[in-house]
Amino acid sequence: MSFGTVLLGITFSEVPIELTTRAVARTATSELQIQNEVEVLQGHSYHVFSVAFSRDGRLLATGSADQTIRIWELESKRCTAILEGHSGPVFSVKFDSTGRKLASASEDQTIRFWDLPNGRNSLTIPGHSAQVFTLALSPDDKTLVSGGKDGTIRLWSLATNQKQLFAISPSAGATIASIAFSPDGKTLASGGGDDSGHPQLQLWETATMTKTAELVGHSALIRSVAFSSDGGNLASASNDRSIRLWNLSNGQTIKTFQGHTAEVLSVTFSPDGKWLASGSSDKTIRIWDAKSGEKVPKHEGHFSGVLAQAFNPGGTILASGGADQTARLWRLNWAGKRSGVHP
């Protein structure tokens, strides 16, 4: 089985590339330096599909096609737990706000919750009829949303015995590749596409799961969506090799970011909303000034596609997961201020 094929038809070559040690960008408002990786986290035996920091920035979770989740302590850079129980690739992982629970989504059609630090699988939620590619937790931890290959978006109440509140299908033959809550939890964004590769990027009112907007502009499957910290903007990454920034007050594109030479597989905002980080099957990470669109010179290190990224809460570390079986930690220096591994 090709897990690249399983995940929406993308496969990755394994050709080594030279590691870039430093990239510097000066914009009108800031200077950003990306130095060599703080650490390459090795242990997974297949693609790393998802990375997530705990809210205090001390733990990193990685989900992999090897069917496991690893928990890493950032100060020591040690793997402190290996969570086993899924029977298929793990596509998405998310910490709750306390850092004591972790949610995961898998090809095995289930969502699981894990207690930390003991790693016990405390809850398994069935319901999807195909791979579950994406999940998100509401800011108050009371609601879970999930999406996947079966084309449904499912909303679950974690406060009332995991009751399924909604199960909607945006369109026949659709795949939900990415989903995110707005910072206030009132809006959901979903991205994906149909069997013909036509993109679908939609906004939903969480309370009723009523569609409130359809954002049109991409020309291929949507791979990743992310809200800005103030909830006013949405970023989307696509197989059309671009990232778009959307004004959610009017549904219009603010800016289109171009520079990747292959599908853009992931996008995320820095905690302050000033920067976007994107990863691509061209094996590079790019960081963009969200206001000006100026990009930091591409940063290389992964030997294959960059599947996932996350900023730590302080915005000083960027974690990435790749098809080269590794997670990597990149040090970000803002205006010459050195960062460590803490938030």
Image (cartoon, helix red, strand yellow):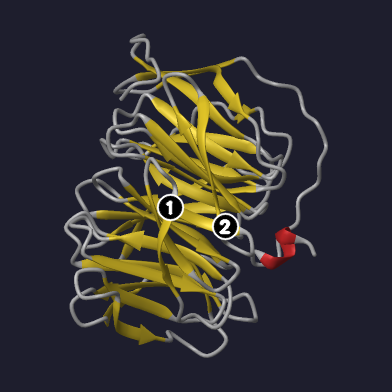
What residue is shown with label 1?
A: 120
67 versus 100 height, above or below: below
Q: Residue at x 44, y 47 (%)?
A: 119
What residue is shown with label 2?
A: 90
Q: Where does the C terminus fall, quadrant-wise?
A: top left
Q: Amino acid at mark 1?
A: Arg
Q: Nearer the viewer, residue 45 or 173?
A: 45
- Residue 217 seen anywhere in this rendered image of the structure: no
Q: Is residue 301 left or right of residue 235?
A: right
User: Residue 205 at x, y = what percent?
Assistant: 22, 75
Q: Residue at x 77, y 28 (%)?
A: 17
123 versus 290 height, above or below: below
Q: Residue at x 29, y 23 (%)?
A: 29
Is label 1 in contact with label 2 (beta carbons under 8 Å)? no
Q: Residue at x 33, y 10 (%)?
A: 337
Q: Where is residue 21, by image quadrant? A: top right
The residue lying furthest to the bottom in this view is 172
